[in-house]
Image (cartoon, helix red, strand yellow):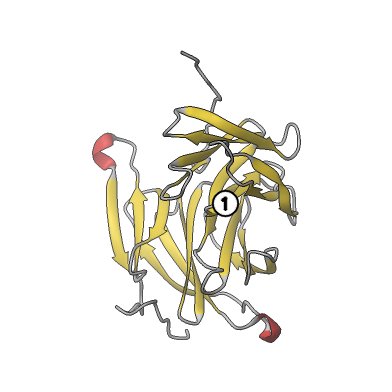
């Protein structure tokens, strides 16, 4: 028997799972300054990729079934596209986009909405500062662009989620202030500005430090995990977003 080992970085958002594709269940995670791909079916690391030596990976997220986003300690964000799977090998090709940071602040977490097949896709990046960055693309052949800034408090340790619904892009950010902050921006075609300015919608009260966030189906609620200092202090909570509907996507009133 052959043992394959590739140690993972000790960061809260440094791994992401991809399932339901021809390649089976694959976990992408940070390993030092590299992103490693672990195949659950093969019980082995099947590929690694690194952008720059010594630049530790802080967070990892799948942008699609073939794309991986990694946030680095330098503040850079790298998008890799997976090569075609041949003979059960799954390798990451060269980086297809590198997003430079406004300042050298580590990327604490990244969130990617579904999209590009039937609409725009939004990438939310939270740096170790008082601002989050949101970028949008309208096709997988195009890079993420149209950057907007979101001022959010308590970003020392945080979680983020984003979704495109109706005519809006919605970003949720939670952290050590025990709140989930909701922001929304109007979406339009790229020739009409693409992504508008973000406005604060509401702040949902949690119980403790927000460690993870996601939008539930049918995308009219927010799912968050409040983790306390003891096992008994762990809670899973679903909250309905203000102004959400039971339709295909949420709608939000102007505030």
Q: Identify whether 232 is placed above or below 166.
A: above
Using residue 170 as the reference point, say whether residue 243 is left or right of it: left
Of 154 and 22, nearer the camera is 22
Q: Residue at x 34, y 58 (%)?
A: 223
- Residue 96 screen position, x and y as percent: 72, 53
- Residue 154 screen position, x and y as percent: 52, 54
Residue at the limit of the structure toward the front, as seen here: 87
Of 115 and 2, nearer the camera is 2
Q: Which residue is mark 1?
A: 66
- Residue 101 screen position, x and y as percent: 73, 54
Of 228 and 224, nearer the camera is 224
Please indicate, yes or no, whether residue 155 appears anywhere in the rendered image.
no
Residue at the limit of the structure toward the top, as seen here: 1
Q: Secondary structure at mark 1?
A: loop
Quarter of image, res 229: top left
**Number of residues whose C-alpha sits closer than 10 Å to that of mark 1, classed few (under 14), some (14–19) or many (20 or more):** some
Residue at the limit of the structure toward the left, as seen here: 232
How many circles with numbers are drawn on the protein? 1
Using residue 4 as the reference point, say whether residue 207 is left or right of it: left
Quarter of image, res 133: bottom right
Of 200 and 143, nearer the camera is 143
Q: Residue at x 68, y 82 (%)?
A: 193
Using residue 144 as the reference point, say whether residue 23 is left or right of it: left
């Amino acid at each position: 028997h052959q043992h394959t080992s590739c140690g993972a970085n000790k960061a809260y958002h440094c791994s992401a799972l991809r399932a339901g594709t021809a390649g089976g269940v694959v976990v992408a995670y940070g390993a030092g300054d590299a992103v490693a791909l672990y195949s659950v079916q093969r019980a082995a690391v099947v590929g690694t990729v690194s952008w720059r030596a010594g630049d530790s990976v802080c967070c990892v997220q799948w942008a699609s079934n073939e794309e991986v986003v990694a946030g680095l300690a330098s503040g850079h964000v790298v998008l890799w596209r997976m090569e075609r799977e041949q003979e059960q090998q799954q390798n990451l090709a060269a980086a297809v986009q590198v997003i430079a940071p406004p300042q050298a602040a580590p990327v604490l977490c990244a969130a990617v909405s579904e999209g590009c097949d039937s609409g725009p896709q939004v990438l939310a990046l939270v740096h170790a500062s008082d601002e989050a960055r949101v970028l949008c693309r309208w096709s997988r052949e195009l890079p993420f662009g149209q950057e907007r800034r979101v001022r959010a408090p308590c970003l020392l340790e945080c979680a983020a989620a984003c979704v495109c619904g109706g005519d809006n892009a919605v970003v949720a950010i939670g952290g050590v202030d025990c709140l989930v902050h909701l922001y929304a921006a109007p979406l339009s075609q790229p020739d009409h500005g693409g992504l508008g300015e973000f406005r604060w919608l509401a702040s949902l009260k949690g119980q403790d430090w927000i460690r993870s966030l996601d939008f539930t189906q049918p995308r009219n609620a927010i799912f968050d995990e409040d983790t306390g200092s003891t096992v008994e202090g762990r809670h899973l909570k679903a909250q309905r977003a203000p102004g959400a509907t039971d339709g295909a996507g949420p709608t939000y009133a102007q505030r």
